Each structure stands twice: as C-alpha cells, then as structure tokens.
Image: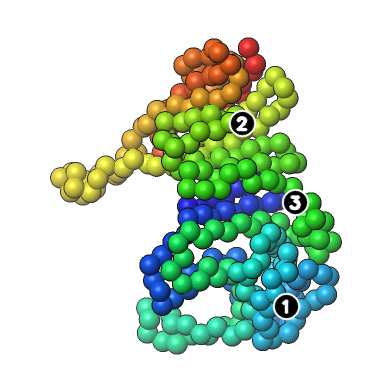
Amino acid sequence: NKSVFFFDDVIVRLGSDIRCDDKNNPIQTTLFQNNLNGDKSMPMYINSDDKITDFPYKCTNENVSWIIDPYNNGYYIPNSSELNIYRDTQHSRDGGNKIDTSGEYATAYLDHGKAPKSASYEYAIKVQTTPQEMSDFSKKPTYKVIQQDSTAHIVKSNVSNAVGYAIFDADKYSGNDFILSTDTPVLAMVKENNAENVSLYLSDPDLRLPDMELLDELNSGVERPSTMKVATIKIKGEWKIDGASKGVKIVKSKGGKTKIAFDCIDGLTLSVNLKAK
C-alpha cells in the first residue's frame, strides 16, 4: 500500500507491506531521479548548506536526515538506513528498446533489498525550499504519522490541524480519533476549524467500472461509465450538516456518534461542513 498526503507546501509519502518473491533483484522506492540537462554542476545539499557538485558522487550515509535535489525540492527522510544517493551517468534503452541511451542524473532511492516480506517507507517533500528550512523541518517536522499499516495510512498536519486518511481495508479499520469506521475503502481529510465546526472531504477512488466481459457485448464506441457507491462512515461526536452539501446526508446522529452517507461516483471528492449539535 502507498499513499500521498498534501499539506500546503509539504507532501508526505508513505508505503507499507512492500513484498516481492524476486530473490535476484532488489526492490527500490525512488525519491527523485533528476536529469541534470547536461550541467553536471547543478548542486545538491545533504544535511548542510554545503553545495555538492561532484560528479560522479555516491552517498549511503545512514545519518542523512534531509536532501535538497538539483531543482530545490527538499526530502526529509526520518529513517535513512536504506537510502542511496548518486550523481552519475545512467545507461538505458529507449522506449522501443531499440537503441542505447544515456544521461547525467542525480538520483535518490530507498533500497528494500531482495525479496522483502513487509518493507515500508516514510518521507516528506518540501517544495522549493532552502537548506535552512530543511534543517528546521528535520528538527521539528510539521506532520505526524498516526497509522501506517495494511489497514490504513493516517497523517496529521501540525500546522493546519488537518488529518488525512487512506483507508485500504474497511472491514479491519477501527479508528479512535475522528473517523471511527467505514463500510468502503475511502480517501478522506478532516479539517477542524474550531470546536464547533469541522470540514470533511471524502472520495471513493474505485470507479467500479463494468467488467470487460460485459463491455465486449456493448457497442465498441460506448464509454465506460463509473458506478455510484454509497460510502457510509461513522465519526466521533454528534453533528449536523451546516449549509448546502450535494451527495451527502446524515443517517443518524446520537450516542456521541454520527453516521454519514456519501454518494460516491467518478472518483470525485465530496465535501461537507459539519456543525456540532
């Protein structure tokens, strides 16, 4: 499972339950692979404001906490034991696998080894940043990972007080903060505006398209329609809808809990403002 959470200029990326039976090749997660566009002097920064322009260059230091790539995007890596950083010429084949190609690149990746059983990763990208900002960020990250497993990935922004949810297994999920349960795997974000008002955003990324067997029976020009699915979640507290909210309704609100139904279709995000009862 993998997920991506956007909080202003910070992107949090999580992975869990990475496994593979291939015992001959390592499994890797790429943080960045930047083409230097023929300029080998494009600098990088690793844990300091000292420019790194060496080419070729290699770093596998386990004490790396942050990097800034040649395009000024910062990467915070809380666990760098699997981190590899290179500046070198890469060789490959073209898209048609007909001719050899090469180019100068700066690359960083996490090496999970061969045939991992349950590998994971966590890193954050700070867009268009500086060494000082990354140094500050690494000492006090602006987010907190609440859950990272096969059931769900949950991350909270300490700045905006928003919480993002990627719930993979609805049957096993049982929350104890805001979203208590769901009958459907969903993506959601909760923003606490104040003690009396909360904004909730939710989508079902599964388009629930017809299977190909059925489509073969239809005319070839017919588009594949998405199928609506009502996703019902239970949240902590008793709430009512504040203002207009298309495709969202309160099913029940009592006993310190509220059940809400969302008419999910086309992978679109539905939003609702909630007011405490």
**Circles 3 and 1: CB distance less than 8 Å?**
no
Residue 113 in sight in this render: yes
Q: Where in the figure is residue 52, as x and y percent of width and height?
A: 76, 78
Q: Which mark is residue 260?
A: none
Q: Closer to the observer: label 2 or label 3?
A: 2
Mark 2 vs mark 1, CA separation in Å = 45 Å
Name the residue rendered at 70%, 46% in the picture: 143
In the depicted view, which residue is nearer to us: 22 or 103?
A: 22
Q: Closer to the observer: label 3 or label 1?
A: 3
Q: Which residue is mark 1?
A: 42
Which mark is first along the chain, 3 or 2?
A: 3
Q: Closer to the observer: label 2 or label 1?
A: 2
Residue 270 in sight in this render: no
Q: Which mark is residue 141?
A: 3
Mark 3 vs mark 1, CA separation in Å = 27 Å
Dot 1 crowding, Cα within 10 Å, few <14, some 14–19, many 20+: some
Q: Which residue is mark 2?
A: 177
Which mark is first along the chain, 1 or 3?
A: 1
In the depicted view, which residue is nearer to us: 72 or 200?
A: 200
In the orientation shown, which residue stands out farthest toward the front? Answer: 117
In the depicted view, which residue is nearer to us: 261 or 207?
A: 261
Q: Which picture quadrant has residue 123?
A: bottom right
Left or right of residue 45: residue 16: left
Query: Mark 3: which secondary structure?
Result: loop
Left or right of residue 115: residue 79: right
The answer to whether residue 179 is above or below residue 122 is above
Mark 2 vs mark 3, CA separation in Å = 21 Å
Name the residue rendered at 66%, 41% in the picture: 156
Name the residue rendered at 72%, 77% in the picture: 42
- Residue type at numbered disc 3: Pro
The answer to whether residue 87 is above or below residue 34 is below
In the depicted view, which residue is nearer to us: 84 or 130?
A: 84
